[in-house]
């Protein structure tokens, strides 16, 4: 099995190299070394916050107030915080043992709250002690948390001070064909994420996907084929979802999306030639959609999957087979994309930490769909000729703008260094991009 996995991995890396040769200039840089990095978060004021996952609880939460140049360890008990969300004026971090840390000053100081009493009757004292929450979101003024051990889903309207349990009966499923009892910890799925779509709250588990009914506090079963659909992001009104489980095949959707609260679903096309569906991290912003595979590196698209770029240069690799270390979280601000890279703490490696990539280095899509009569261009004798008057911008293949001309029919290229470039020409609302070599 391991031999087959390595062969598939080599094939995936080879195909990536073939289809993405012109889009590998972007480079990640490590801005914090932190063992077993679990999370990175951008506060509203621009502070960077990170956390790790040390079993002995000797790590904690770190904060940088200067874009990652320096980091300060926060004075807060460590409960291996794995996910952070913005909830009103608070940043909330969910950790082990049903503990939540919250900060009202952009991650500088924290206080710890606990919601374990809500699940005590269902998973017991030992279950509460080891319980974790990967699924947390702020939805319509309520902080929702779903546990991983069969307790259910709760919400708070006062940022973690008090809690209300949502209906557990509607979340139960048959185990071995027999309806489970109310206190059976295995009656409920293990939940990976909570996310909003079209004004609805969706809950994603190992097996099932549910939609929350606000009127009666119940859950409606939408799909029973989640298959670890545990990561998602809201992109251009669409909730885009990936599956965090190993499966190397083009018969499984790479990404799925819904824009109507889970009523209907579509598929985002996979990178050409790539068969890895194990999506560990996903993020979107004004630039596009970012997808981090478990060990297969990172991909980026600015046209919703019509074309993909492989943006893994600078990411640490885990072995000579070409496998990359695990991206746990991807996020961004106006200038950078950030990534938390995990490495097992007992290996004492310095590759774990927070990495960043300048957005100016992101690649530009090679081709845009335009009307048949759209402007076209060609290069001859150090000049880019345009079929009509257009606004023209020229970029390096890594996305750095090197030239911009308004209302022109030709652009002088003599001042550019030899290399491959991307041009964008806009005329009468039509837009086309293409590549040329100089």
Image (tube, helix red, strand yellow):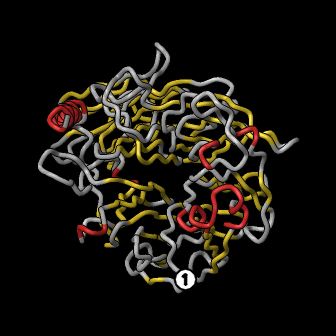
Quadrant of the drawing holding the N terminus: top left
Badge 1, how many Cα within 10 Å: few under 14, some, many 20+?
some
**Residue 14 placement, left or right of 328:** left
Question: In the displayed structure, would residue 44 be above or below residue 209?
Answer: below
Residue lying at 63% horizontally and 77% vertically, measured from the top left: 112
Looking at this view, is 334 or 164 the one in front?
164
Q: Residue farthest to the top?
A: 372
So how many labels did they put on this image? 1
Q: Quadrant of residue 393?
A: top left
Task: From this view, report whether residue 41 is shown above or below residue 197.
Answer: below
Residue 384 placement (x, y as % from top left):
28, 32
Q: Position of residue 64 (x, y in %)?
A: 46, 77
Residue at coordinates 65% horizontally, 47% vertically from top-left? 184
The part of the image, by quadrant, that contains residue 302 is: top left
| Quadrant in which the C terminus is drawn | top left
Residue 157 is left or right of residue 20, and the answer is right
User: Furthest residue to the left?
Assistant: 320
> Considering depth in this image, is 423 or 84 the residue closer to the camera?
84
- Asked if residue 73 lies left or right of residue 18, the reply is right
Q: Measuring 77% from the left and 49% from the top, which residue is drawn there?
A: 166
Where residue 378 appears, as percent x and y from the top left, is 28, 25
Percent coordinates x, y for residue 7 in the rendering: 15, 33
Is residue 351 among what the camera can see?
Answer: yes
Q: Farthest bottom residue?
A: 75
Q: Residue at x 71, y 67 (%)?
A: 117
Secondary structure at badge 1 equals loop
Is residue 282 or residue 38 the one in the foreground? 38
User: Is 315 drawn above or below residue 409 in the view shown?
Assistant: below
Q: Can residue 437 be seen?
A: no
| 273 vs 251, nearest the viewer | 251
Residue corresponding to mark 1: 76
């Amino acid at each position: 099995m391991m031999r087959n996995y390595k062969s598939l991995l080599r094939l995936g890396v080879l195909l990536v190299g073939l289809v993405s040769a012109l889009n590998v200039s972007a480079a990640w840089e490590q801005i914090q070394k932190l063992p077993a990095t679990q999370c990175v978060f951008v506060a509203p004021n621009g502070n960077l916050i990170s956390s790790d996952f040390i079993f002995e609880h000797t790590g904690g939460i770190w904060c940088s107030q200067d874009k990652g140049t320096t980091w300060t360890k926060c004075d807060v008990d460590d409960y291996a915080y794995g996910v952070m969300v913005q909830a009103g004026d608070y940043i909330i971090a969910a950790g082990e043992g049903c503990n939540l840390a919250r900060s009202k000053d952009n991650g500088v100081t924290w206080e710890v709250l606990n919601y374990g009493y809500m699940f005590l009757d269902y998973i017991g004292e030992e279950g509460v002690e080891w319980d974790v929450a990967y699924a947390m979101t702020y939805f319509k003024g309520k902080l929702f948390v779903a546990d991983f051990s069969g307790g259910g889903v709760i919400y708070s309207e006062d940022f973690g001070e008090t809690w209300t349990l949502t209906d557990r009966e509607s979340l139960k499923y048959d185990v071995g064909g027999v309806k489970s009892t109310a206190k059976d910890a295995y009656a409920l799925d293990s939940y990976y994420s909570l996310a909003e779509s079209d004004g609805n709250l969706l809950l994603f588990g190992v097996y099932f996907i549910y939609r929350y009914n606000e009127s009666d506090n119940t859950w409606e079963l939408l799909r029973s084929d989640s298959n670890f659909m545990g990561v998602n992001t809201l992109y251009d009104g669409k909730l885009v979802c990936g599956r965090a489980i190993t499966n190397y095949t083009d018969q499984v959707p790479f990404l799925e999306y819904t824009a109507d609260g889970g009523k209907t679903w579509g598929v985002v096309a996979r990178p050409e030639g790539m068969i890895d569906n194990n999506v560990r991290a996903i993020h979107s912003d004004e630039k596009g959609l970012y997808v981090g595979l478990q060990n297969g590196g990172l991909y980026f698209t600015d046209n919703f999957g019509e074309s993909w770029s492989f943006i893994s240069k600078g990411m640490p690799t885990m072995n000579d087979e070409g496998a990359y270390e695990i991206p746990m979280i991807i996020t961004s601000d106006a200038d950078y994309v950030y990534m938390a890279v995990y490495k097992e703490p007992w290996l004492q490696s310095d590759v774990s930490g927070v990495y960043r990539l300048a957005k100016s280095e992101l690649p530009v899509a090679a081709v845009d769909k335009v009307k048949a009569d759209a402007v076209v261009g060609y290069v001859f004798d150090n000049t880019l000729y345009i079929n009509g008057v257009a606004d023209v911008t020229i970029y390096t293949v890594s996305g750095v703008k090197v030239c911009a001309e308004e209302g022109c029919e030709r652009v002088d290229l003599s001042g550019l260094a030899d290399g491959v470039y991307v041009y964008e020409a806009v005329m009468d609302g039509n837009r086309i991009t293409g590549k040329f070599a100089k």
